[in-house]
Image: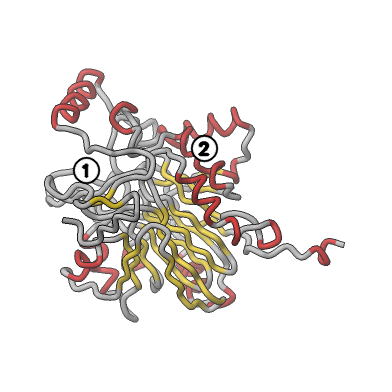
Amino acid sequence: MNPYHDPGKSHHRPNGFQNNYLEFEPKSLSELLRWRREAARLRLPPPPQAATPRVAPELDWLRANALAGAAMQPAVTWIGHATAMVQMGGLTLLTDPMFSQRASPLPLLGPRRHAAPGLALAELPHVDLVLVSHNHYDHLDAASVAALNRQPGGPPLFVVPLGLKDWLAARGITRSIELDWWDRQRLEGPRGPVEVALVPAQHWSSRSPRDAMATLWGGFAVLAPDCHLLFTGDTGYSRDFGDIRQHFSDRQTVTQGGGFDLALIPIGAYAPRWFMRDQHVDVGEALRIHADLGAKRSLGIHWGVFQLTDEALDEPPRKLAELRELRGLAEEEFFVTAIGETRRLPPRRAFNPLSET
C-alpha cells in the first residue's frame, strides 16, 4: 500500500505513483535481455572519440562566492553526471549528489565512473541545500548523502520526493523534507525568500526488484530573487514541461525578469530509443524541453561519466552542437561544460520601464 495515496491526485496509485501522460511499466527481463543481445551483436556502445573534458575547479572563487551572502553571483558548476553545484540566492545547492565510483548497490558490480567528480566532497564549500530527484543509484548515492550530512558546519537541508524521507532517516539523515508534485517549500536566503518546488517528470523509481514506483520522482524549480532554476531530473519527453512553464507563469512575466534563468536538462543515456524513450530524452527532445520551458539558457547534464546505454560517452555534446547549428541556436542558449567548469550567470532583474527611457 502507498501510505501517501490521495485518490484526488491522478499520479497517485494505491500501490505507488505514476506519470501524468504515460502509464510507465518498467521493462521486463526479456526486453532487458533483448537490449543486451542487440548491443553485443552490434558491438555497442562504441568507444568515445575523446575523454570527457575536465578543468581544474575555481576553488577559491567558489568558496568566496559561497560566503558572499547577498553579494553572491549566480553560478553553476558541473561536477559530473546529474550532479551540479548551483550558487544562487546566497545559497549553495547540489543536485543529485553522486561522488562514488559505482552507481550500484554492489561495490564491484554495476556502472563505474569513467570520469572523476569535478570537485571532491572535501573540496565543496558548505552546501546549504541538496535536491534529490529520485532514488535510482546514479542519482541517490548513499555514501555521498551520508558524507554531506557530516559536512563541517552542519548538514544541508535535503529536499526529496514523497517516500524518501524515511530512507534518509534510516541512514541518520534527519534534516529533510519531502514534497509531492507542485508542493512548495519556502526558505530564507541572504537575498530574500527562496522557494523550492517539486515538479513532474516522466520517469520511475526503484532500488530493488520489488519496489518499482513505490516512491515519487520529479524535478525541481528553485526561485530566488537573483535566479530561477529548473532541474528536470531524469525524464522522458512529455507535456509536463509546458505545464511547468504555465504553472510558474505568474512569477515569470517579462516585468518580473522572464522565464527560467537556467535549466539543467539531461542529454545522455538515450540509446536504444525503443528501450529508453519513455524514461530518458535524447538530445533533440532535450532541446524541445528547453523551448517548452522558455528557459533563457540550459546546461546539458547526464552524459560523459557513467556508460549506462548504447551511445558513446561523448556522443551527446556532439549531437547537441549539430542540432544547435541546424536550429540556429547560439551556444550560450544550450551549452555543455567541462567537468569542474563554472559558468557565471547574469543576476536576474525585474524590468523597469523607467530605466529604459
Q: Residue furthest right?
A: 357
**Relative height, residue 240 to residue 256 (above, below):** above
Please report the residue visible at 63 percent of the width from the left and 40 percent of the height from the top: 330
Where residue 101 appears, x then y in whole percent? 23, 52
Please report the residue visible at 49 percent of the width from the left and 66 percent of the height from the top: 87
Q: Where does label 2 land, which residue?
A: 288
| Disc assigned to residue 134 | none
Q: Where does label 1 land, which residue?
A: 111
Lateral position of residue 56 relative to residue 48, left or right = right
Where residue 219 appears, x then y in whole percent? 40, 54
Tell me the CA gap for discs 2 and 1. Answer: 28 Å
Label 1 sits on what residue type?
Answer: Pro
Dot 1: within a 10 Å radius of its alpha carbon, few (fewer than 14), some, or many (20 or more) residues?
A: some
Q: Is residue 136 among the parts visible in the rendering?
A: no
Mark 2 or 1, closer to the camera: 2
Q: Is residue 29 among the parts visible in the rendering?
A: yes
Mark 1: which secondary structure?
Answer: loop
**Relative height, residue 282 to residue 162 (above, below):** above
Foreground: 340 or 155? Answer: 155
Where residue 73 appears, x then y in whole percent? 57, 67
- The numbered mark, 2 or 1, whose residue comes first in the sequence reads 1
Badge 2 vs badge 1, beta-carbon distance below 8 Å: no
Foreground: 66 or 160? Answer: 160
Mark 2: which secondary structure?
Answer: helix
Label 2 sits on what residue type?
Answer: Arg
Please report the residue visible at 53 percent of the width from the left and 79 percent of the height from the top: 190
Please report the residue visible at 21 percent of the width from the left and 52 percent of the height from the top: 14
Foreground: 51 or 101? Answer: 101
Q: Quadrant of residue 256?
A: bottom right
Q: Count up the numbered dots.
A: 2
Where residue 139 appears, x then y in whole percent? 29, 53
